[in-house]
Amino acid sequence: MRKAGQHIGAFCQGLHRHHGEVAVRRILGVLSLAKKYGVALTEEACAVALETGASEYHFVRRYLERSPQLPLNLRQVDPLIRQLTLYRDLIPARSQQDTTTLNSTTLDEENPHEPDGTPTCTDAAPPRRHGGGARNPLTPGTSRMDAAHRSHLVSVSDELTRRSDRLLERRRKQAGFRDAQRTLDNFDFGFNPKMNRSLIFDLATGAFMGRREDALFLGPGGTGKSHLAQAIGQAAIQQGYRVLYRETHVLLDELADAVADGTRKEYMASVATAPLLILDDFGMRKLPHTAAEDLLEIVMRRYERASTLLTSNRPVEDWGKLLGDVAAVSAMLDRLLHHGHVLTCGPRSWRTKTAPAS
């Protein structure tokens, strides 16, 4: 009998084998998918990914989002996924004798697109999706799909990958990151070893966004707040979320321009509905006198509806003095901290370390 989580485990092992430490957040993402969609359906998605050689996190996530077994309110329909699902039914159930792991020769022979060492489906194919009376069009005892069917399935997978890549690139541009190269892969965790790394990777899974929670990154300048905020934004985009990144003073300037143009309502709507809003460098520059009211309105409209990540080099005790409105700041902090995660960065500054000696 197939053990629960077998394909998920094999898929995660493959991620770690091919990506090393970079795969940590992707593995956490797979586990969060299992929690959201259920182990059985995630097992099936991982089995399909292993069987077709599309062994990437985004493939599993997209497969789950478009699964016909999901309720209509969670399902995203894509014709290519429909084709992939139909062709998945052509994979025959393996006999008890065939449940051992395929060797590398078989992998290379069956699927030249699958990298060496990628774990493959080690058991019977997952339950079929389309009713109980469907017959397998392949002859009994066949252990692989027809070459034409496999070729078509690979082309479908390639097209899905191209679509995904285009969407990711478009969303990165729309996010407006100050430095799009900031990721968790190139962050130096060893410089400030006491930083809560567990919280950082938990935020990178995007689970907090599903719960509509917020985050505050606090600490002196040069301790990695902006780097981590943008890295988590990049991870959120990889998982299919739309992200809006703005330095706080830039967002308020854009809001002022929208007021002058008569488009404030539309601009506030776009800010309020982004699944993840990153407000960076709060307190770095002097803000307009309307800043407290504007920021409070943004936080109130997003409260328990979408996630906000705010970075600041000023302790929260100074925010009232900074904005000149203690009541508004108290109301804003009350909402941010109600379902909020606080990350303390520092105390050492990377810029100070790397500054040339005088």
Image (cartoon, rainbow, N blue to C red):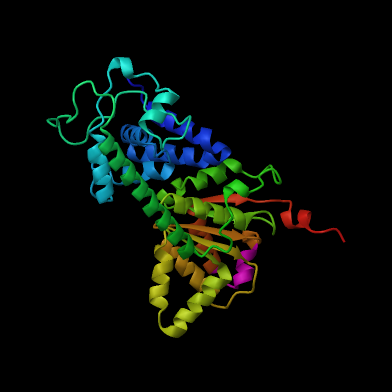
Q: Which quadrant would residue 163 be assigned to in this image?
A: bottom left
Tell me if I can see residue 20 in this picture: yes
User: Which span of residues is magenta-colored?
Assistant: 318-327
Tell me if I can see residue 216 in this picture: no
Q: Looking at the image, which residue is at 59% across and 61% down?
A: 179
Depth check: 156 or 71 in front?
A: 156
Which x, y percent locates residue 72? 23, 48
Depth check: 211 or 37 in front?
A: 37
Q: Looking at the image, which residue is at 45% across and 31% down?
A: 118
Farthest residue, direction left = 133
Depth check: 180 or 226 in front?
A: 180
Query: In this image, 135 relative to 78: left or right?
Result: left
Assign the magenta stretch its main secondary structure.
Answer: helix
Q: Looking at the image, which residue is at 46% across and 65% down?
A: 174
Which x, y percent locates residue 213? 46, 52
Asked if residue 97 is positioned above or below residue 182 in the image, the reply reads: above
Q: Looking at the image, which residue is at 55% across and 56% down?
A: 230
Q: Which quadrant would residue 61 be assigned to in this image?
A: top left
Query: In this image, 21 relative to 12: left or right?
Result: right
Which x, y percent locates residue 70? 26, 43
Residue 198 forms part of the magenta stretch: no
Residue 322 forms part of the magenta stretch: yes
Asked if residue 90 is positioned above or below residue 168 in the image, the reply reads: above
Asked if residue 208 is positioned above or below residue 9 in the image, the reply reads: below
Which x, y percent locates residue 322? 63, 70
Count the numbered circles shown. 0
Query: In this image, 139 relative to 344: left or right?
Result: left
